[in-house]
Image: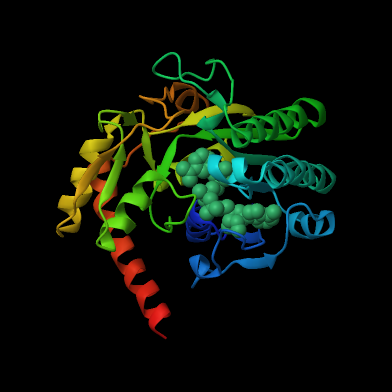
Amino acid sequence: MQALITGGAGFIGSNIARALVGQGWGVRVLDDLSSGYLHNLDGLAVDFRHGDVRDPQAVADAVAGCDVVFHLAASVGNKRSIDDPIDDSSVNVIGTLQVLEAARKAGVRKIVASSSAGIYGELRTMPIHESHPLDPLTPYGASKLCMEKQCLAYAATHGMEAVALRYFNVYGENQRFDAYGNVIPIFVFNALQGRPITIFGDGMQTRDFVNVADVVQANIKAALAPGVSGAFNIASATQTRILDLANAIREGLGIPVEIELGPRRAGDVEHSLADVGAASAAFGYAPRVTMEEGLPEYLAWAKGEAERIRNTERN
Ligand SMILES: NC(=O)c1ccc[n+]([C@@H]2O[C@H](COP(=O)([O-])OP(=O)(O)OC[C@H]3O[C@@H](n4cnc5c(N)ncnc54)[C@H](O)[C@@H]3O)[C@@H](O)[C@H]2O)c1
């Protein structure tokens, strides 16, 4: 099997690349390295193409001969989309249409696109089922909803199979800290630099954290499930309290870390918990990695990464 991974040098894409290579797939990556890193693919036999998903020729060349496209390239995150909504929609909507058009012309069998729980907006019913209202509150949520609908429209119109995977809070190896980062890398990298962990609110709020290994599992199972198209939640279907997470990070790192509480941020949801029954029924998705297993693995990787960054800065 031959796959194209757009955004394959990023956090989730590079984990998919590693798993596919391990399973004997041919893997091509198209990435403009705007938020991904070439060294995420170190040691992997992948055909790397530096390019932008908005460039029709680059996408057509990358898609040629592929059975499956894993489409992850995106402008990622609410904050980034509020800072630059034009770029957000340009990559997430137009970029996705370029990928769909190229895939259709090349006769690709299936596209597995990365969507986001951000498309639900304010969470009203728990656990969150795919039928929950779709009312995104940020340009990012809106652009991910649009790209998801475009994928499903291509499935309806052109007979190409398309699956959109709505990830909840993903964490794991190759997830770095940056200004737009998720809560786990922010806590961990702050702690590793001797800074306090700041929780916005009382820490009683919960999130559904899913380990990247389970997101990889979902992508590959969805790709291999014949005749399956649609949108599916991908999560652990468990809740972790943010205060418990901060304490577990402090204990796991084994260094003194101050945990401080700050004012609640407007727009932050109080609780999040997904129903993953649809993905389980459609393609056998079953979350396996618990926070007790996944967090220590991530902490070990993050310590090594912090050391690598220190050495790079020193030289
Ligand atoms: N990390 C999460 O918790 C999470 C949650 C929900 C959805 N997602 C979705 O999963 C996907 C992967 O996210 P991630 O967390 O790995 O982020 P990431 O930033 O590490 O990966 C995105 C990759 O896309 C590449 N890219 C960006 N714009 C591009 C362009 N115009 N052309 C080509 N490549 C481009 C980046 O260089 C990067 O390698 C995204 O579609 C994101 O919206 C992630």
Residue 145, given in percent of the width and then of the height, sits at 64, 30
Residue 219 can be seen, yes or no: no
Q: Looking at the image, is 230 positioned above or below residue 33? A: above
Q: Looking at the image, is 19 positioned above or below residue 216? A: below
x 77%, y 32%: residue:
154
The coloring applied to the image is: rainbow
Between 305 and 65, the residue placed more toward the observer is 305
Residue 8 relative to residue 206: left or right: right
Between 313 and 235, the residue placed more toward the observer is 313
Residue 188 relative to residue 178: left or right: left
Residue 174, given in percent of the width and then of the height, sits at 43, 59
Q: In what quadrant of the picture does the C terminus appear?
A: bottom left
Q: Looking at the image, is 71 positioned above or below residue 299? A: above
x 43%, y 55%: residue:
175
x 53%, y 24%: residue:
121
Residue 191, given in percent of the width and then of the height, sits at 26, 57
Q: Residue furthest front?
A: 263
Residue 270: image quadrant is top left
Residue 129 relative to residue 27: left or right: left
Residue 240 relative to residue 92: left or right: left
Residue 51, given in percent of the width and then of the height, sits at 72, 62
Residue 160: image quadrant is top right
Residue 56 can be seen, yes or no: yes
Between 154 and 245, the residue placed more toward the observer is 245
How many callouts does the rendering have?
Answer: 0
Q: Residue furthest bottom?
A: 315
x 51%, y 30%: residue:
117
